[in-house]
Image (spheres, rainbow, N blue to C red):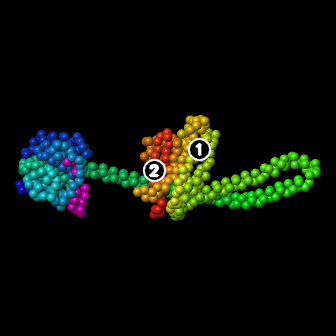
Amino acid sequence: MSDSIDPQPSPDPVSETLIQDISWEVLVKLITSTAAVTGRDYYPVLAKQLTAALDVKYAIIGEICQWDGDRPERVRSLCFWNGQGIVENFEYDLTCTPCGQLLEQASQADKNVTLCWFPKGVQEHFPDDINLVKLQAQSYLGVALLDPETRQPIGHICVLDDRPLSENKRNQAEIVLSVLGTRTVAELKREQAERREREKIKQLESALAELQYTQSKLVQIEKISSLGQLVAGVAHEINNPLGCITGNLVHTADYAADLLEHLSLYQQHYSQIPPDLSEHAEDIDIDYLKEDFPLIVDSMKVSVDRIQEIVSSLRQFSRLDAEQTLCDVHEGLESTLVVLRHRLKANSERPEIQVLKEYSELPKIPARPGQLNQVFMNLLSNAIDAVEEKNQGLSYRQIEANPNIIAIRTQDLQDDEGDRIAICIADNGAGIPLDVQSRLFETFFTTKEGERGTGLGLSLSRQIIAENHGGSLTFDSTPNQGTEFIIELPVSPVDQAG
């Protein structure tokens, strides 16, 4: 028989003439050896048994993975038996190949099985197929695997040899492939269905992640907006009476000084003081009053200045950012520390948490200060939580001997990665367990118990830094030794949504 696409359909039971060309023993071995395996394990067993049954060197089982309109364009190997073992799966172009000719004609034919047979000289027919040259192939026989519903090819099974392929072997191959083709199509369809299900699961996971991302972003926007409005409102309400106190303190100091001076003049000019006045002066300890009253006024002025500093920090911290502006990150860090000062102070369980600052001279950067302050708040709050967690079970003296420390370091970086600044916030707290470090920035993931953690702080912080400012937020942590978070922000403007 000349090389050709076999015109004979083979859906019918295998004819007695063909059965005579192959023993029942071979057929039974093929069927039983492949019946016990499914999925990906099926293809290597099939390829190995095919080459043994037909006494050929190579067997390939492939799946169409790319189409050009109605024409199959690329195939993905499911198994390639090279005569000694399984070769790693690969993809190949069908253009100018016997498999391409087989599948293209199968896609146009109205047959259940299309057989392609080149008994010899296959390289002469497809001189551009480098795989034939590598395999030193002389003969080729392949069958298209058709989808039972659409009657379109979904893959192929082919055998090749470095010797001519006789008509008797061709008949044997037709029997074998007719028997095993349906099973192979079923396995391939099942695998494709599983692949589609996996793809659907991935899409659902992606949709869920996107939903969580959107939800967290809405929470972030609402949280920052509500906090900003609340703090700004409180700062405004405090600022009005504070202004009154500040203004009147100046006059109070002046009036006190005038009265004390006037009292001194009275004492100088009227040495004879009536007994009742002398007795009253002793009762109120006039000398101590004259000495202490100016100090009280000065102390009040210091306290008012402190309140003004807090109000200023609150207003700085709660800025609502409509767009980027030039920002001094040191101001943001300081205002955040003022807001958190109550958590840093000493209490009955531990000494004060020490804050060590190592600020470098930094340029102002284009940023959204309110959002950066939210990041600083999250990281510093986590650092406080970390050192307090490490304090569990320790006495006041033990903590005092090994004090809680939060270190803040800033740097101006200029290297191949571009001009940027770095803000490093480190603590000597409990550290992050190794088994959860990879999940640290996941939305809603938290290691804190109860209502102490929402799982939003770090994920929102990374979004703010990466998406809204074009920077990066990373960390380095050693359990029981501490954690350092590193923020890097570009000096040049970044066009980011958010």
Q: Is residue 106 visible?
A: no
Q: Quick check: is 71 in the magenta stretch?
A: yes
Q: Quadrant of residue 49?
A: top left
- Say which amino acid is labelled 2: Thr
Q: In the orientation shown, which residue stands out farthest toward the front?
A: 268
The residue under the point 49% across, 49% down is: 485
Q: Is residue 121 visible?
A: yes
The residue under the point 80% across, 59% down is: 255
- Secondary structure under the numbered disc 1 in the rendered image: loop
User: Whole-percent x and y of residue 194?
Assistant: 30, 49
The residue under the point 63% across, 43% down is: 346
Question: In the depicted view, which residue is nearer to us: 206 or 389?
Answer: 389
**How many residues crowd mark 1 within 10 Å: few (<14), some (14–19), many (20+)?**
many
Q: Which residue bears the numbered disc 2?
A: 474
Q: Which residues are magenta?
A: 63-80
Question: In the depicted view, which residue is nearer to us: 221 or 436?
Answer: 436
Q: Which residue bears the numbered disc 1?
A: 353
Q: In the orientation shown, which residue stands out farthest toward the left?
A: 1
Q: Quadrant of residue 5?
A: bottom left
- Say which amino acid is labelled 1: Ile
Q: Mark 2 or mark 1: which comes first in sequence?
A: 1
User: Whole-percent x and y of residue 297?
Assistant: 75, 54
User: Whole-percent x and y of residue 37?
Assistant: 23, 42
